Amino acid sequence: MEATRRQILAGAGAIAFTGAVAELLGTAATGSAASGSAATGSAAARAGAFRTRPAGPTVPPDHAGYGPLVPDPQGLLDLPAGFRYDVLSRTGTPMRSGEGPVPSNCDGMGAFTGPDGRLRLVRNHENKATAEFPVPHVDGLVYDRGGRGGCTVLEPDGRGGLTGERVGIAGTAYNCAGGPTPWDTWLTCEETEDLAGTTGYEKDHGFVFEVDPVDPYRTGAHPLTALGRFQHEAVAVDPRTGVVYETEDAWVEPFGLFYRFLPYRPLGGAGSLRAGGLLEAMRVPGVPDLSVVQEPGTVFERVEWVPVPDPSARRTPVRLQDFGRRGVTHAQKLEGCYWGGSRVFFVSSFARRREGSAADHFGQVWAYEPDRRRLTLLVVFGPATDPALPGESPDNICLAPGGGLMVCEDGGGNQYVLGLAPGGHVYPVARGRQALAPAAGAAGGSTGQPEYGEFAGVTFAPDGSVMFVNCYTPGTTFAVTGPWGRPTAAGAPGGVGSAPSGG
């Protein structure tokens, strides 16, 4: 007989709180909170709480958050009054380095301040073999001559332009998301398991690579094989212990896993992860599929970690390997992953019964506290019933300078950058206006409704003054300035007026 969701949760020892889940989403900071420096402890923690709700996250009225979004006369990016954007980079335009055009498919991104005091962005390009604009192959930075993905490094000038734009790594594939390290490098992740001899590749793919934003030649193009070979999405590093957490974006069965990597040289700086370590997968006892958990505030107190038999997946993909009788916990579309305070946040973008999940949802945000071995479901998304409001398929995430998280939406129709407040509500921060082809209907014909390019790579400058975010396609990197701070119920902090949103 099929077990009910309630029976599964009862057997797993889960607790569904009826009050607040304190301090789980209140950690954000000024200074380096949203960059690779966030982990160093220079950020100031802020306490907050999530309210347990019977359904999805509350959506505040138009005046909440930073206020209602103002239509952009340029048709690129709608923002609240008092905010503005600059376009830093577009796919197909020449890079300042002269190495070639800006590559396609702008995805995950991190912001770093180097020892010279200059700000740099490392931007992923999720390119497959057919990408229109591959990452140019630059000697000393190429992993596989058959790969068209990689990263570029941007140097914003603080005035809405760039002083530099160059290749950071090349010859990789499907560079989706990643994460910053406490030593201010970027870990870029390949979301593929393609082997040498397929799709024109000369080497195996499915690895994590390290990119030094100041000197990419220092880190080169070396796969961090001990972190596993699977469909990587994002990573987050515990700045206290050096443990690396990893998400696996698998949207068909068997679904992905949530991993932790215990390095042999924790916090050893650039190149230290090449020394190896132990890769483990998460097991929530009694819960084989996270989609079955539907109540925000549900807590699991006995999270376990199981060694991965073969991290290199020489014969069998990791998620298909034998983890023993008790198994491990899977989830569909594990994507965003980010460290904050004493916990790691991670996202399941959606779950669909028709594709094999145990239950349906439109997106979950989880928090894992290593010190307590405790896992908490913070939010279950949507769907959006009003096209003017947010509500489905959360993807990339980062800490917000005003508390809580920023979330990139990757669903259908309108696409948003969302704020996820410590109080538990979701509010719109930006809406993309670059329309793609109209959506297809059930019979394959056009619905007449436009589709918009998804957001990706949201990150903040180390001082919290600028939000950087990508439109995946058409590839566009934006710098958004304004009164970043704790959002209020009265609109933008400080009573800022209605400056135009366009750049």
Image (spheres, rainbow, N blue to C red):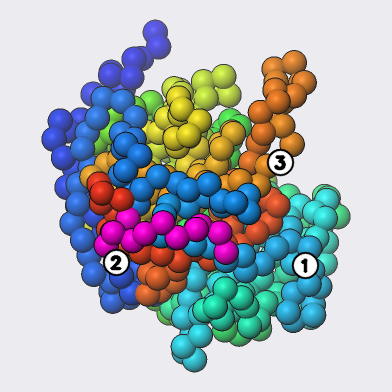
Q: Is residue 58 left or right of residue 446?
A: left
Query: Element at badge 3?
Result: strand
Q: How far apart are labels 2 and 3 at the CA level?
A: 35 Å
- Front tag of 2 and 3: 3
Residue for badge 2? 29
Q: What stretch of residues is rendered in magenta? A: 492-503
The residue shown at (45%, 46%) is 69
Q: Is residue 21 visible?
A: yes
Report the residue that reaches farthest toward the left: 19
Q: Which corner quadrant of the image does residue 329 belong to?
A: top left
Of the image marks 2 and 1, the number of the one nearer the N terminus: 2
Q: How far apart are labels 2 and 1 at the CA level?
A: 35 Å
State whether the magenta stretch is mostly helix, strand or loop: loop
**Which residue type does callout 1 highlight?**
Thr
Check disc 3: other Cα within 10 Å, few if <14, some if 14-19, many if 20+: some
Residue for badge 1? 93
Q: Nearer the viewer, residue 333 or 109?
A: 109
Q: Is residue 40 left or right of residue 148?
A: left
